[in-house]
Amino acid sequence: MVSRVCAVYVLTVVLGAGAWVVALALPSSQEPGCVTAERTRQFAAFLDGAFERDMARHPIRASRIGIKTYEDRWDDISERGWRLEAQAAQRDLQALHRFDSRCLMPADQLNYRLFERRGRDTLARVSWHRTEYLVTQMGGIARSVPNTLIGSHAIADRHDAEAYIARLRGVAPLMSELVSALRTQETEGVRPPRFIYDLVIEEAENLLRGQPLDESTGEQVVLADFRAKLDRLELAPSVRRELLAKASRAVRDRFAPGYRLLVAHLRQARTAASDVAGVWKLPHGDQYYRYALESATTVPLDPNELHAYGLQEVARWQHELLKLAPALRLSSSLAQMLAQVRADSRFFYEAGPTGREAYLADASELLAKAKSWQGQVLTHPPAADIELRPVESWRERSAARAFYQNPAQDGSRPAIFYINLYDMAAAPRYQLAATLYHEAIPGHHIETAVAYELQNLPRFRKFALVPAFSEGWSLYAEQLAQELGWYVGSDQELGRVAMSLLRAARLVVDTGLHAKRWSRAEAIAYLDNNTTGAHFDNEREIDRYCAEPGQATAYYIGMRRILELREQARRQLGDRFELRRFHDAILGNGPVPMPILEEQLHEWLAGETHLDSSAVP
């Protein structure tokens, strides 16, 4: 609990037939006379110092944000690193509690509460770190290394280049530490499903192809990235040759041996793995899944009630899907309609280069339009730019079909909307608009860039990772785009409904896999029988939920809460409700847990009501 609590706020999150109650401590009101400029300065310095220490422990995240201070190193993933993480969280909480929350400005009282929650979330994650899968096709350090080097490690000068090379050299010891941690997990009965090993091994082996590692005509992907970044600099030819030679040796002698060690271990460990998909099989698996659900959604959820709610919402969206059948000249039978949507060539791009080029062209045109429409969403759209890129070939088979990468904090690197062109059958034409609105504008890019550009927000809040907030907003953005008239024709509306149906189905299959002990095949069959996705796409979806239990539920839970809050605002403000101002209020405090978001919206509503009443003569 927050120190000196004066009340307890009870939030009821209504999800269909179920309801979950969250007790949230509210800070005491301000003590008159004890709020001083010096105390405010000290508290701000404490928060900033804690963030800087956090970045020093997490260089990968620092690079993703655009902080270069620690760009020559990797995170410490050893048991010692986890102990240091817990100790840092405990020290920060102790230091936090030396501040009297009653003697802080209202904004800092909120910072106090959020920082306290952050510390407790960190301690919870540390307590489960031996249960969380260390290598998957969705994440983990083995995937973070190439993603960070290629996507986040900018090279603006020789110092950045030398730091890149230092990271290449650090891969061998990093992978050795990873293998050691995997062995520890395995002795405790923690292994991902066998099919996840196959995806991770394939991706790692893709990093071991190309010169100077074999006789391929092409260059190894990380070295090619390094060369391309050097080509943008004005360097003396001798310096460029020296840096390239260093990087080539580091890839050959340190990067490649590290990944070979990992692949060898994964091949051996795979033989002892099973095809059981759910985390219920792990030590204390049921408790771990409840932790994973709450970590993703920021509210405690009962898996059985969530499953029932998912079934209810799937039925609702299937009804909406069938309403589109006449306009699309499709069957009014659900099974037949799903089969037609998967098979009808008018819904797909051509296979091969022609289709990929057409998809990229259509996505580029739509992204340009979305950029021009941002003023319909917010009163002050963010300045950060976003660009479109196809997923790189080395990871496209296991990567999601589309995803967002945040911009650098200083504007030196734009945000990126990635689209996966590996299988054009898994990238239907009708889903492009909804996918772009989710991942780019008005979805992830809007909520991320707004937070980055908030002037008075401490950095631990600007760059906070709150899945229910970010994914909830981005799923809400898909519906918002429809309300604003951004979808054109029944085909694009089909994409919006189909994507919403998939997100509802995620509640069913995620809880099915991890709480109801479904097999991977059962979960894939559920998506095949109830959503529009192609079989290959459904396989990748289920593999993702197996790798990241609970994460897929954040979308729908967050979106429903935003819609409920919007409805409350409409009822209370009536004709005075203005959509852009509501969005300003939702995004204006950066990413926050759902209970805090509700509290902030209620405060905003009180302010709006007061402003209106004060204008009455």
Image (tube, helix red, strand yellow):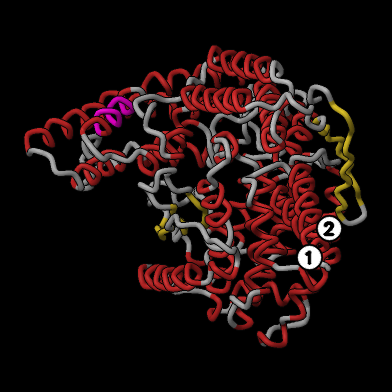
* Residue at 58% across, 18% down: 85
Q: Amino acid at mark 2?
A: Leu
Q: Amino acid at mark 1?
A: Ala
Magenta part of the chain: 161-168
- Judged by its main secondary structure, the magenta piece is helix
Query: In x, y percent, where is residue 237?
Result: 7, 39
Q: Is residue 367 above or below residue 100?
A: below
Asked if residue 612 lies left or right of residue 408, the reply is: right
Q: Which residue is mark 1?
A: 615
Direction from residue 105 to residue 610 in the image, left or right: right
Say the numbered circle drawn on residue 65. Answer: none
Question: Percent x, y for residue 117?
Answer: 71, 30
Using the image as rendered, state which of residue 49 and residue 243 is in the foreground. 49
Residue 271 in view here: no
Crowd rating for badge 1 (residues with CA inside 10 Å; few <14, some 14–19, many 20+): few
Residue drawn where x is 80% and y is 29% of the image: 287
Q: Which residue is mark 2?
A: 311
- Residue 70 vertical position relative to residue 530 in the rendered view, above or below: above
Q: Residue 480: horizontal and vertical position, in percent? A: 66, 68
Above-or-below relation of 479 to 458: below
- Residue found at x 26% / y 24%: 253
Q: Quadrant of residue 209?
A: top left
Place of residue 166 in the rendered image (x, y in percent of width and height, measured from the top left): 30, 25
Q: Secondary structure at mark 1?
A: loop
Residue found at the very far front of the displayed protein:
617
What's the residue at 25%, 33% (across, down)?
A: 161
Quadrant location of the N terminus in the rendered image: top right
